[in-house]
Amino acid sequence: QPSQFTSLSMWTEESDATSAVNGAYTQFRSAFSDLLNIYGEMRSNWYESGAVNDAFFNRVGTNVLLSGDAGTNWSSIYTTINSANLILKHTPEISFTNEATRNEVMANAYFLRAYCYFTLVRVFGDCPLLTSGFESEKQEDMYPSRTAASEVYAQVETDIEEALRLMPASSKLLHKASPAAINMLRTEYYLWKAKRLGGGNAALSTAQSSVLKAGYALLPTFADIFNLNNEANSELIWTLPYIVNENVTPGTSPNFFAYYLAPNGDRTRLREAGYTEDEVPAGSHAQYVVPTQAYCDFLAEDARDTRTDVSVRVFEDKFLTEEVQIKRMVVKFKGSFANDTRSFDSDVPVYRLAEAYLLKAEVENALGNTDAALQNLNVVAKRAYGVDNYYTARTQDAIDNAIISEILKEFVAESKAWWAYLRFNKEFELIETLKGREGEKNVTLWPIAPACLNTNPNITQTEGYK
C-alpha cells in the first residue's frame, strides 16, 4: 500500500524505533497466528478434517496441496519482514540515550527477519530476498524474483548471528527476542543446516554451543506450563501473547486453536447431555480439524504419560449432535470461559525449555555422543512418565526415533512435528501419505497463491505445482 507517512516524520527519535519493534511483533503474531500450525503440524499426517468436512484439512492431512490453499500466500510474512527492514534501515540514524537500547531494537529486527526467512525458505524453497525496506510504491525493486534458497539461508545465518551479537545479555523478555530465544533459533537453524543442507559436523558443533538453559527450568508438572495464571513461568522462552476478549465475536478467533474445539453451535446441546464447558470446550465456530485416532492412540500408549490428557480429549461415546459427531479434539490451548464466552487467551509458545533439551539430545546423538543424548532426552521423559532412564537403547537410530516420539508427544499442536520429520530426513519413511513419493518434484515444499503470482509477474510457481 502507498505509505501514509514519510520517513522524515516517522524515524526521528528513540520512541519511533521502539514503537516500530512493537508493531513488527504485532504483525508477526498476525501472520503466524494460523501459519505456525498450518506449516508445523498439518502435513505430519496426524490430523484430519473435523466436524466440518473441510477440503483443505482433508488435503493437507494427506499432503496434497493446491495453489489457492491456506498457507500459500506469503504476503503477511513479507509485511513483517518489511517492518524489520525499515527498523534496520533507520535505527542507526536515530539518537539514543542508551546504546544498549539501540542494540536491542536492532537485535529484535534481525531476529524477526531471520525467523521469517527461515520459515519462508523451508516452506517455499527459492523466495524473494528483500533487505532494503519499502517506503514507496514507486521503488524500483517492487517486483522481485525468487532468490536461490542458498542465498536466503545465508541471510538467515547472518541475521541470527547479528541478533545474538547485539542483544544485551540481560534481556529476558517473554514476548520478544532474548539471548535464549535467539539461541533456540540458532540451534534449530544449524541442525537444519547440518542435516538438510550438507553442513556436517561444523554446523552440528555450532548447534551444540547454542542451546542456553541458564535462567530457565522445567516445571515439575506438565499441565502447569499452560496454566493461564502462570504464563510467565520458568519453562517458557518465547511466546505469542493473547488476552481475554480478544476477537471473540461469533465465527472468529485470534489464533488457530478454535479450529480444534467443539462447534460453537453445539454448546447448548452439550450442556443438556451433561457435559461441562471444561469437559467439551466449544470454540467460536465449527470444528474444522481434529487429531487422528491413530495420533490419540499413540499419545496414550503409555498410561503413565501425564501429557496425554492435557493435550487431547477423546470421547469414546462419540457424543451425537443433530449434525455431527464430536470424537476428538486438541484442548491444550483452549483458553478461558466466562460469561458464556470462550476467550482464546492462552499464550502460544514458540520456544520453551523442553525443546532445548530435545534439540540438545538431537545434536549430541548426531555427533555420536550417546550418553549426552540420552541424558538430555530422559530429562523430558522423566517428567512425562515419572521414571528415570525411560529410554535406554543406545543405537543412533533408536535414539533418533525416541527423540521424534518425544517431540510428537511433548509438543502436540505446538508446530514442531513436520519440521522434526524433515530435520531427521524421515518424512518419506514415517509419514504414511509421503511413502513412495520421493520422486515427486518439491513434494515437501508449498505452491504459491495466485494472488502472489498475479500481483508480481516476476514470481514463478513452485516447480511441480500448477
Image: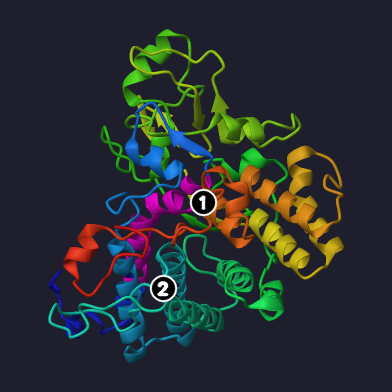
**Image side of residue 4 versus residue 432, left or right:** left
Q: Is residue 359 above or below residue 258?
A: below
Q: Closer to the camera, 28 or 74?
A: 74
Residue 207 quadrant: bottom right
Mark 1 vs mark 2, CA separation in Å: 19 Å
Residue at figure coordinates x 60%, y 77% from the top left:
169
**Image side of residue 343 versus residue 314, left or right:** left
Measured as percent of width and height from the top left, residue 177 is found at 50, 68
Badge 2 density bin: few <14, some 14–19, many ≥20, Cα 10 Å? many
Q: How is the image coloured?
A: rainbow
Quadrant for the C terminus, please: bottom left
Judge whether residue 339 can be spotted in this image. no
Give the magenta-colored segment's residue range: 20-44
- Which residue in the protein does label 2 denote? 113
**Image side of residue 262 versus residue 399, left or right:** left
Q: Is residue 232 above or below residue 299?
A: below
Residue at figure coordinates x 82%, y 56% from the top left:
374
26 magenta-colored = yes
Secondary structure type for disc 1: loop
Hey, what amino acid is under mark 1? Answer: Ser
Measured as percent of width and height from the top left, residue 298 is found at 65, 35
Q: Is residue 248 above or below residue 10?
A: above
Quadrant for the N terminus, please: bottom left
Measured as percent of width and height from the top left, residue 25 is found at 38, 64
- Which residue in the protein does label 1 denote? 415
Judge whether residue 235 can be spotted in this image. yes
Measured as percent of width and height from the top left, residue 404 is found at 67, 51
Secondary structure type for disc 2: helix
Residue mark closest to the camera, 1 vs 2: 1
